Amino acid sequence: MLRNLFVGLGRALRGTLYFCWGAFDFALSLPFRLLAGAGAAPSPPIAMPVIKDSKPTGLTPSDVVQSLLRESRIVYTYAGACLLARERQPTPEKLSSAVKAWLPGLTVGELQKLTCVGSTGICEHLQGTKHIAGLPRVQPLPARALTFEPKGADPEDGLAMLTRELGNIAPGLG
């Protein structure tokens, strides 16, 4: 019961302090807000370039963003499917022509980078806002065959690798 009393008093005190701080902040900033635009010349309008060659698509900006996100998820899924099947999969139909011409030219390492950055990173790369290191920009690329290392090409098995790592940490154990 005493605990509830102290909690209530603490909340009341905190509310009072927040109210006092808000009133102090309001009173202190009032002259600056009242005189903020007095005597200043209006800023000139921003010059925006007019693009005359573009055709109206009828898409809203949110439609364009949704389209890019959908396309990036398709590319992410395609890269994962190629890596899991260990062969190039058919290029998905629901992609833009630029991305359709770009995907068949990617190597195994580049497909692995796509799966590492995720669909958000792919979306930024497709837009051109943030380039993924070691990955070519979206442009038509010559088609390449995927070359994977043969399964079991690593001569070390798990036990040998663990023994080697233990030897590096504690020389007496390896």
Image: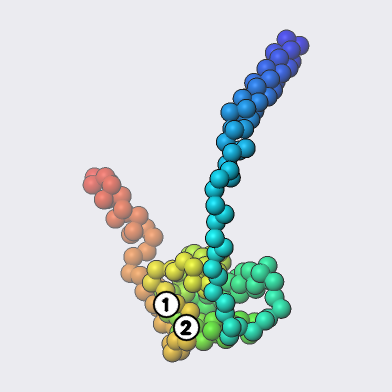
Q: Residue furthest right?
A: 1
- Circle 2 — which element? loop
Foreground residue among 98 and 117 = 98
When the figure is inspected, residue 55 is found, relative to residue 34, above or below; the finding is below
135 vs 10, left or right, is left
Write the residue at 58% across / 43% down. Answer: 38
What quarter of the picture does the N terminus occupy?
top right
Residue type of the residue flagged with mark 2:
Gln
Image position, residue 29 (x, y; %):
59, 32
Is mark 1 in CB contact (under 8 Å) with mark 2?
yes
Residue type of the residue flagged with mark 1:
Pro
Q: Quadrant of residue 81?
A: bottom right
Image position, residue 50 (x, y; %):
57, 77
Q: Residue furthest bottom?
A: 142
Image position, residue 151 (x, y; %):
42, 75
Foreground residue among 61 and 131 = 61
Q: Residue furthest front?
A: 39
157 vs 23, left or right, is left
- Circle 1 — which element? loop
Residue topped by disc 1: 136
Residue topped by disc 2: 139
Please say whether residue 7 is visible from this viewpoint: no
Please say whether residue 37 is visible from this viewpoint: yes
